[in-house]
Amino acid sequence: SELPHLLVTGSAGGLGRELVPRLRAAGYRVRSLDLAHPDGAEGDLVTGSVTDAAVVEGALEGVDAVVHLAGQSREAPWAQVLEANVQGLWTLFDACVRRGVAKVVYASSNHATGMTARAEGAELPADAELRPDTYYGWSKAAGESLARLFVERAGLDVVSVRIGTCFARPANVRGLSTWMSYDDCTRLLAAALDPRVRGWHSVWGISRNTRRWWSLAEGEAIGYHPQDDAEEFAAEVLAGADPDEVVDLVGGGFTTTPLGQPN
Ligand code: 15L
C-alpha cells in the first residue's frame, strides 16, 4: 500500500534535520516547512511560520499526514512559548480540519510531566498525570489537551509523543533512561503514521533503554518496537558523570531552571 504524503513542520530544527532524510529513505514523500531552510536543503520546501494560517493551509495541499515538530524546544519567555507552541499548534489543527488532513503526529515532551518523581522499578504510563516543569513543559501539556479536543470534537487522529531525549547519543546519566535514537524515532513515526492508527494515542518517545523510567506498552500497542538501548553508552556516560546532575525528577535540569529564562 502507498505511504502517506507527509508535511514535516520544524524540518530545519534539531529533530527535523535528522528525521526528514530518514523518512525519505523509508519511502515517504516529504514536504518541509520551517522559517528558513539550511543551505543546500533539497526537495519540497515551504518557508514560513506555523502561526501563519495561509502558510500552513498552503503547505497542507495534497498532504495526508503531518509530523509536527515546529515550536520552541526549550524554556523561553512566556509570550514566545505561547505563540510558537500553543498558537502554532492551534493554527495547524484548525488548518488540518479545513483541509481534511486527519492524521497528526504531535511532538510533545517528557517535560509535560517533568515534576514527576521517578519510581524505582515502576514504569510510568504514557498517560501519567500532567506535571509540567517549565513554561515550555506547560505548553506541551496544553498541546496534548488541545490535540485531544481536536480528536474528540473534530475527528482528527493524533499520536502525541512524549519525547525523552532525542539526540545522537545520551549526554548524561538521565539520558541513559530518557534517550531515543533517531532510528527509533523514525520507527515510531512510521508506526504512528499507519492509517489504521486512529483516534487519540499518547506514547513515550524512548528507545528500549535498560534503565528506562517510562512504559513502552502504549507505543507497542500502535506497532512501535524500539531496537536501540542507551545502555551501549553507559560505561562512557557514567565515567564522565556529573555528581550534581538532577535525576530524582524525570524532567532533570528543567525542574530547577528559572521559569521563562532560556536554558
Ligand atoms: C526536550 O523537550 C527538549 O526539547 C530537548 O532539548 C531535551 O532537553 C529533552 O527535552 C530532554 O528532556 O532531554
Image (cartoon, helix red, strand yellow):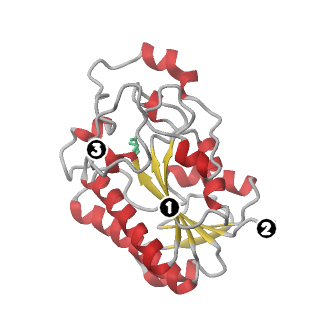
Q: Are marks 2 and 3 in contact (CB under 8 Å)?
A: no
- The location of residue 179, given as percent across then percent down, is 49, 35
Say which residue label 3 marks.
263
Secondary element under disc 3, as helix, strand or loop, is loop
Q: Mark 1 belongs to which amino acid?
A: Gly
Q: Nearer the observer, disc 2 or disc 1?
A: 2
Q: How busy is the neighbourhood of tag 3: few (under 14 within 10 Å), some, or many (20 plus)?
A: few
Vertical side of 149 occupied by 212: above or below: above
The answer to whether the beta carbon of the residue marked 1 is less than 8 Å from any atom of ligand 1 is no
**Residue ID at (38%, 18%):** 241
Res 17 seen here: yes
**CA neighbours of label 2 inside 10 A, class few (<14), some (14 to 19), many (20+):** few
**Residue 10 numbered mark, or none:** 1
Amino acid carrying mark 3 in the image: Asn
Give the percent coordinates (x, y) of residue 19. 61, 52
**SS label for mark 1:** loop
Identify the residue position indicated by label 2 in the image.
2
- Of the image marks 2 and 1, the number of the one nearer the N terminus: 2
Question: SS at mark 2?
Answer: loop
Which corner quadrant holds the N terminus? bottom right
Q: In the image, 134: left or right of 67?
A: left
| Picture quarter with the C terminus | top left
